[in-house]
Image (spheres, rainbow, N blue to C red):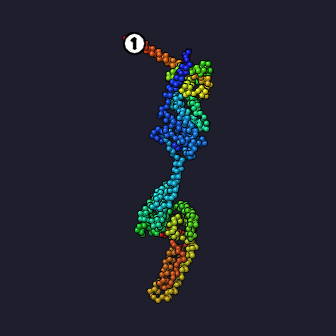
């Protein structure tokens, strides 16, 4: 109920009083400090997570840089802020990752023992590759490659005069480790694939022999090891076989042929890659070996068609496998190329025509020697020399017909060498100057291992069946 | 701000940084919005708290108000005056809150008010002032929560937030006459409640006096 009659001034006073009182009372309703801070933080956080579009962002401060304008800063009452430049961090991380995973390993590949990054090469690069290598045969190949790398590093250090005894010992230890690894993988392979294990053994031994040759350690039995030649000793130890594994069966024809195909392909690829980087003579030498290999393969293919000669074909392919493996090591290793002649690694295998020419030349030279000696004997007065010269003449007269009837080329070469050497000695004895019996071309007996045979083409020896001569280097 | 959103981490400074606020690098929109926040956050909270009588909920509503307004700013709309806009958003949120509580009485009251245009006395501003002059403000504050929201809304806007009839009309999307009627009826209802409370208190006091007198007599 409104008061009926109340003065206007009092009404206004009361009205004002009501507003003031209500307003004053309402002012007691307010946020606490903590609530204010919390609310502000929530609102500011919302602003930060829902920022203005870039087009609306206009820096207030005229003098501030563009960077500062873009980098707006809102501080809460109780929290400050600092920037974590994630994009920059991601970029830096990416660059660092590329540096660590690509650049450093790439640079490490060129290091030698003693370099800072050598551990990266051995313990990261190579271990990663080992991990990523599947298959026992591939693992054997990789361990062989690692072994070759260690030896190449040692050679490089030796050339620079930096190969200390400690480094050599570490390299020798590494050679032994890789050799053991390869042998272990071969044994693993042997459990499932005996032929594959034999092929892997042949390839591994061939590589080791080339390295042994390049280290002037052709005596692979290790009896002539030089003091301090730790690497050579390690290779010799690796080449020593258990009695059980010294005479493995010749692998199956198909598997041998498959591996030979792979090796010959690899050899041709290497030949193409060497074009321009080695001398023409070097290319010619390698090309000649490839031709020899191709010829042997063709013969083996022909022989494989007949059951009687199938074994000979397989043995021929084993020989090819050895030669191709050695060629691969020779061509991929610069140090080996510089230190050993290709002839000592992979001797030339003469063709039938070349053999015939060689036979003819040797026989002619021997005949000439006999003639010279016969003529010279007439002028000799010393009875002892005369007796010796006549004995030689008699021996040569016996040897010459024998040589003409010899069908095995290697036997002919061996016998002719002896006869020509005897004639040369006799001519020297009787005082004839010069050596009339120097072969125009050194015709070596094809290198072979105890498990490898050298097959002479049947056409070269004039027989219907190929003759296989086992020789030992 | 986008850069900030992706890459900022807050670190406790160990002390109140109110005096250290740095807004030198804020854009104009951000600066205006934050100024509006500083100016009106307390008033909005007070309004919300008195309307819904729930402190925590009121804080949430104020927060939601500012986030909605910020989203509006982000869309590129230019807000000339933040105050009415903030009150408008808050008011809508409060109504939404009531609707979520399924208070059918709100709609019922709104419907009633929509039909009843009020008497001349109720439409008169001076009448409302005269009515207000008869009410104790402190008691009114205490009993405000008991009023229906339609009256509470206009009374708070008028006497607590100090908005004029025109502003309130825009805010509530009602005619000024309706606002005046609601203020008048709200005050009337408020006075009735105060009178009822006074009568109850008086009755209680008398009852106590009688009881004391009876006790004395007995003794």
Q: How many numbered callouts? A: 1
Q: Position of residue A52 (x, y in %)?
A: 58, 40
Reply above or below: A6 against A46.
above
Q: Position of residue A354 (x, y in %)?
A: 57, 73
**Residue closest to the eye, A55 or A233:** A55
Residue visible at 50% across and 86% down in the picture: A376
- Is B80 left, or right, of B216 in this rendering? right
Residue visible at 48% across and 61% down in the picture: A111
Residue visible at 44% across and 65% down in the picture: A163
**Residue closest to the eye, B185 or B56:** B185
Res A406 visible: yes
Classify residue B179 by image quadrant. Answer: top right
Res A446 visible: no
Classify residue A463 by image quadrant. Answer: bottom right
Reply above or below: B200 against A429.
above
As drawn, the residue found furthest toward the left would be: B219
Residue visible at 47% across and 40% down in the picture: B12
Q: Position of residue A313 (x, y in %)?
A: 54, 65
**Residue closest to the eye, B15 or A457:** B15
**Label 1 crowding class (10 Å Cα cut-off): few <14, some 14-19, many 20+?**
few
Reply above or below: A195 against A379.
above
**Residue closest to the eye, B88 or A400:** B88
Residue of label 1: B215
Label 1: chain? Answer: B
């Amino acid at each position: 109920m409104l008061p009926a009659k109340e003065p206007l001034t009092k009404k206004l006073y009361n009205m004002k009083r009501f507003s003031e009182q209500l307003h004053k009372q309402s002012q007691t309703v307010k946020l606490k400090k903590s609530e204010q801070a919390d609310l502000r933080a929530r609102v500011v956080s919302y602003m930060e997570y829902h920022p203005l579009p870039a087009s609306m962002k206009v820096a207030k401060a005229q003098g501030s840089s563009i960077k500062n304008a873009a980098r707006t800063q809102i501080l809460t009452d109780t929290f400050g802020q600092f920037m974590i430049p994630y994009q920059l961090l991601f970029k830096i991380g990416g660059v660092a990752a590329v540096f660590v995973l690509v650049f450093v390993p790439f640079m490490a590949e060129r290091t030698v023992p003693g370099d800072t990054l050598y551990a990266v090469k051995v313990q990261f690069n190579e271990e990663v590759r080992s991990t990523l290598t599947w298959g026992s045969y591939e693992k054997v190949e990789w361990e062989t490659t690692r072994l070759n790398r260690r030896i190449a590093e040692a050679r490089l250090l030796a050339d620079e005069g930096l190969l200390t005894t400690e480094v050599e010992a570490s390299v020798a230890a590494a050679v032994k480790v890789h050799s053991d690894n390869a042998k272990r993988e071969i044994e693993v392979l042997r459990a499932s694939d005996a032929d594959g294990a034999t092929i892997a053994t042949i390839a591994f031994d061939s590589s080791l022999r080339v390295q042994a040759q390049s280290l002037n350690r052709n005596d692979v039995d290790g009896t002539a090891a030089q003091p301090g030649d730790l690497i050579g000793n390690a290779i010799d130890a690796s080449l020593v076989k258990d009695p059980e594994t010294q005479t493995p069966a010749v692998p199956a024809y198909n598997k041998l042929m498959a591996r030979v195909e792979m090796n010959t392909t690899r050899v041709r690829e290497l030949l193409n890659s060497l074009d321009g980087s080695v001398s023409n003579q070097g290319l010619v030498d390698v090309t000649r070996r490839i031709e020899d290999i191709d010829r042997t393969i063709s013969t083996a293919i022909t022989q494989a068609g007949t059951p009687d000669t199938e074994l000979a074909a397989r043995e021929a392919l084993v020989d090819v496998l050895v030669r191709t493996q050695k060629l691969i090591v020779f061509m991929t290793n610069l140090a080996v190329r510089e230190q050993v002649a290709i002839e000592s690694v992979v001797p030339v295998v003469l063709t039938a025509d070349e053999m015939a020419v060689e036979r003819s030349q040797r026989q002619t030279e021997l005949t000439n020697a006999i003639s010279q000696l016969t003529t010279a004997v007439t002028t000799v007065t010393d009875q002892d020399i005369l007796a010796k010269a006549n004995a030689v003449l008699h021996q040569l007269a016996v040897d010459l017909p024998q040589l003409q009837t010899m069908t095995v080329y290697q036997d002919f070469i061996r016998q002719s060498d002896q006869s020509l050497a005897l004639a040369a000695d006799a001519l020297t004895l009787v005082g004839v100057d010069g050596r009339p019996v120097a072969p125009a071309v050194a015709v070596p007996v094809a290198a072979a291992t105890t498990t490898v045979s050298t097959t002479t083409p049947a056409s070269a020896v004039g027989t219907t069946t190929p003759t296989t001569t086992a020789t030992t280097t | 701000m986008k850069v900030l959103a992706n890459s900022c981490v807050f670190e406790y400074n160990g002390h109140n940084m109110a005096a250290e606020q740095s807004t030198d690098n804020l854009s104009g929109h951000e600066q205006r919005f934050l100024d509006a926040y500083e100016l009106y956050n307390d008033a909005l909270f007070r309004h919300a708290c008195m309307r819904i009588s729930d402190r925590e909920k009121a804080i949430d509503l104020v927060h939601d108000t500012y986030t909605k307004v910020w989203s509006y700013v982000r869309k590129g709309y230019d807000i000339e005056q933040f105050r009415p806009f903030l009150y408008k958003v808050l008011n809508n949120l409060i109504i939404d809150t009531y609707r979520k509580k399924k208070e059918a009485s709100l709609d019922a009251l709104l419907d009633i008010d929509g039909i009843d245009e009020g008497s001349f006395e109720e439409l008169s501003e001076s009448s409302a002032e005269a009515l207000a002059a008869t009410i104790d403000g402190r008691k009114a504050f205490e009993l405000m929560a008991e009023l229906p929201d339609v009256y509470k809304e206009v009374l708070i806007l008028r006497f607590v937030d100090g908005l004029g009839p025109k502003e309130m009309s825009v805010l509530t999307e009602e005619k000024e006459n309706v606002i005046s009627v609601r203020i008048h009826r709200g005050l009337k209802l408020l006075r009735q409640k105060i009178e009822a409370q006074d009568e109850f208190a008086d009755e209680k006091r008398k009852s106590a006096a009688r009881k004391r007198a009876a006790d004395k007599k007995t003794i």
